[in-house]
Amino acid sequence: MESLMERITTDPEICNGKPIIRGMRITVSTILDFLASGESFENILDAYPVLENKDILACLEFASKITDKSIFTYGLKAS
């Protein structure tokens, strides 16, 4: 079973090494900003058709883990 966190990657050549979704040029922070402004999953998926529902859930899990610093125990996988 795939962990949601496996969908979050980093690559120094993409978006200045910021956490991104599945190696694409869509940052976790972009998705979190949309969610914070009240956008629905449906609207985000319409705006970014390459994304999947699990990608948005992965962004939320990433945010949750980074706020309690457990992200450092998972590490980030390079894409």
Image: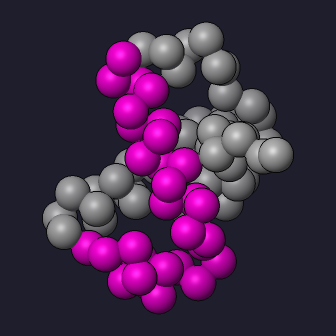
In the image, is residue 39 above or below residue 76?
Answer: below
Residue positioned 17% across, 64% down in the render: 37
**Viewer can see residue 41:** yes
The reply to whether the magenta stretch includes residue 44 is yes
Q: Which quadrant: the C terminus?
A: top right
Tell me what residue is drawn at x 71 percent, y 53 percent.
23
Question: How many numbered marks appear?
Answer: 0
Residue 44 locus on image (x, y percent): 41, 76
The residue closer to the viewer here, 76 or 6, is: 6
Residue 2 in the image: above or below residue 52 = above
- The one nearer the camera, 39 or 12, is 39
Magenta stretch: give its range.
39-68
The color scheme shown is one colour
Residue at the limit of the structure toward the bottom, as seen here: 46
Q: Residue 24 placed where, x, y %?
A: 67, 60
Residue occupying the point 82% across, 46% down: 1
- Which residue corresponds to the image point at 65% horizontal and 19% vertical from the top-left? 74
Where is residue 29 drawn, in percent x and y? 39, 49
Q: Main secondary structure of the magenta part?
A: helix
In this view, the residue in front, 16 or 76, is 76
Please check the rendered image and state whether residue 41 is part of the magenta-colored stretch, yes or no: yes
Of all residues, the one furthest to the front in this rendering is 1
Q: Is residue 35 left or right of residue 69?
A: left
45 is higher (above) or lower (below) than 34: below
Q: Against 75, is 26 above or below?
A: below
Residue 15 appears in view: no
x and y, in percent, of residue 5 in the image:
63, 39
Q: Is residue 27 left or right of residue 5?
A: left
